[in-house]
Amino acid sequence: MKLGILSCSTKCYSTRRLREAAEQRGHKVKVLNTLKFAIDLEQGEPDLYYHSKQLSAYDAVLPRIGASITYFGTAVVRQFEQMDVFSANSSGGISNSRDKLRSMQILSRHQIGIPKTTFVRDKKDVLPAIERVGGAPVIIKLLEGTQGVGVILADSVKIAEAIIETLQSTKQNVLIQKFVSESKGRDVRAFVVGDQVVAAMRRVAQGQEFRSNVHRGGKTEVVELDDRYREAAVRSAQIMGLRVAGVDMLEGKDGPQIMEVNSSPGLEGIETCTQLDIAGAIVDYMAAQVDFPEIDLRQRLTVSKGYGVTEIHVPAGSEYVGRTIAESGLRDKDINALTLYRATTVIPNPRSDRILEPGDRLLCFGKLESMRSMVPRKTRKQRQPEVQELPSTEVS
């Protein structure tokens, strides 16, 4: 395998270990400075230039995209994808995980534990938002902070108000998040490669510091995760579109609470703590996957006129409940069921004799006209009626 490691820092621990692991396994490897690429676009010929010379062929790339170069870095990864080069993490996955609000929005659609979170811009919305997440103390986060920078614990509503007002006055976007008190000063980092957690450690804050990041002096200890935490970590990485990820979880009273999914997790802390060859696990996984480059399903399948990809829901009371996929008549309507989602279970390429149950979701490719007729009208959750403000009357 000829591997390119996309990194602006050739001497950092993670880049050095990944290069060593690839060389030890007999692979050709080169560290490529992400900022030295030029992206060339021409009809049918996406191409890359490196140091003003046409880039030679690579089997795979491993992106190590820093937060400060997210836009250009993901553009480079996207170009490799258009050239059918396998990337350990997709450009979309990196973008999803880099923005804390975006990642929480994506995770919130799924049955996976996350701390209650809210995002507001209007000053009048701050107090109601704090109440909705459970009141003080609350965590205030900058959307693009890393390594614990931009994460603040506000002990009271007044302090929270003042911090948010100050940050917003400097044009900073902030999240307000429930403080998970039972996990104060500690969290779990699970390192996901493919569909496995290859290592995990608990990080514990020291002294009065509530942030457990190693860069903030947090101590680490090896932890053996149970199935709930392993499944939550793997599913979170997959939902984000990442094959290699560091998933940070709080240990809540109701189970794992996903705090962040990191697309460029550092190796030094977790390899030192666990004494495991995580860099080698990443390289081995990539070597086994190079013949399966990331494919944008919608980009590839929707180029046929009148055909596309959509999700068909099977609500309770649907005529399809209790029928098999074959009996549903999908194939007769020129519709193929690609994946069946049932609660937290994902069933790829479901068998035709699979019986459909209430709540199932089918990811399908087929004739759009046929699929539109099968999508029920959206039912929205019942909400409290809006309170209408009455005009004030003055008493003379």
Image (spheres, rainbow, N blue to C red):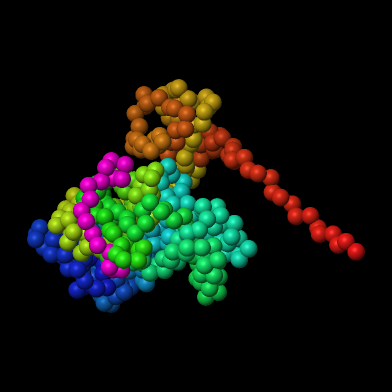
Q: Residue shown at 9%/61% (left/top)?
A: 24
Q: Residue shown at 34%/28% (left/top)?
A: 351
Q: How many marks?
A: 0
Residue 313 at what x, y percent from top left? 49, 35
Residue 5, by quadrant, is bottom left
From the viewer's side, name the closer residue of 316 and 140: 140
Q: Is residue 249 visible?
A: yes
> Residue 155: within the magenta?
no
Q: Residue shown at 43%/30% (left/top)?
A: 331
Which residue is farthest front? 207
Residue 9, by quadrant, is bottom left
Taking the image as shown, residue 102 lies to the left or right of residue 125, namely: left
From the viewer's side, name the closer residue of 254 and 293: 254
Q: Write the start and end of the magenta stretch as one range.
A: 215-230
From the viewer's side, name the closer residue of 305 and 371: 371
Q: Is residue 240 visible?
A: no
Which residue is farthest bottom? 52
Residue 206 at what x, y percent from top left? 29, 64
Residue 252 at what x, y percent from top left? 38, 48
From the viewer's side, name the closer residue of 289 and 357: 357
Q: Residue shown at 36%/71% (left/top)?
A: 69
Residue 19, by quadrant, is bottom left
